[in-house]
Image: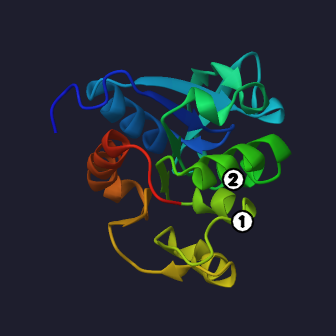
Amino acid sequence: MGSGDLAGKKIAILAAGGVEQVELVQPRDAVRAAGAETVLLSVQGGVKDGRIQAMNSDIEPADTFAVDALVGDVSVDDFHALILPGGVVNPDKLRQDKDAVAFVRSFVTSGKPVGAICHAPWTLIEAGVVEGRTLTSWPSIRTDLRNAGATVVDEETVTDDGLVTSRNPDDLPAFCARIIEEFAEGRHKR
């Protein structure tokens, strides 16, 4: 993949306070390096002074990141692809926010590509978009995925019709490479 594979593409990153910093930063930097513009979206209750607090290993406060817009104020039509970083607290906040859930549901059903890592599939479950799909995730949410009708595998990265999932930060190199490929391809049949 060349450095301009995503030129002209606008990528949404949806995260709340408690996001795992490395799972926000590495995918963001990878798609930017491929030429994309990124927009950090969040939810009303997850922003303090226009920023969200990231974490290292879910427990150590890391950096804060400026939020570009609230998810309730944007449209799926504004973006070419979506990144859902993990961390335990982040997707737990997102799945309780009606605007975040509606945005994720609309994004997946639109056929646009989505990348979700670690605990991020919790938001996909809440959005009702995992049934009949094959995904991977952090081990502790695999039962939740199965109960929502997904087929769960333990692989570094899994792609199911534009939905890319990975298990944990160790999978980030493969996850970043795969989302760039999927985001460059664009729309899928779902």
Which mark sits nearer the N-terminus, 1 or 2?
2
Amino acid type of disc 1?
A: Gly
Look at 67% across and 57% down and name the residue there: 123
Amino acid under disc 2: Arg
Reading the image, the residue beneath label 1 is 128
In the image, farthest residue toward the left? 2
User: Is residue 184 rendered to the left or right of residue 41?
Assistant: left
| Residue 176 tag number | none
Q: Is residue 7 above or below residue 171?
A: above
Determine the secondary structure under disc 2.
Answer: helix
- Could you classify mark 2 by the number of other residues whose Cα lies within 10 Å: few (under 14), some (14-19), or many (20 or more)? some
Mark 1: give few (<14), some (14-19) or many (20+) Cα within 10 Å: some
Describe residue 76's horizontal placement relative to residue 37 as left or right.
Answer: right
- Pointers 1 and 2 in contact (C-beta within 8 Å): yes
Query: Picture coordinates of residue 157 (x, y %)?
Result: 34, 64
Q: Is residue 4 above or below residue 56?
A: above
Q: Residue at x 43, y 63 (%)?
A: 161
Q: Position of residue 159 (x, y in %)?
A: 38, 64
> Which one is nearer the viewer's eye here, 184 or 21?
184
Which residue is located at x 64 percent, y 56 percent?
A: 88
Quadrant where the image shows the N terminus: top left
Residue 89 shows up from this direction = no
Q: CA distance from mark 1 to mark 2?
A: 7 Å
Question: Up-down: is 100 above or below 158?
Answer: above
Residue, disc 2? 105
Quadrant in the rendering for residue 40? top right
What kind of colouring is applied to the model shown? rainbow
Q: Nearer the viewer, residue 89 or 131?
A: 131
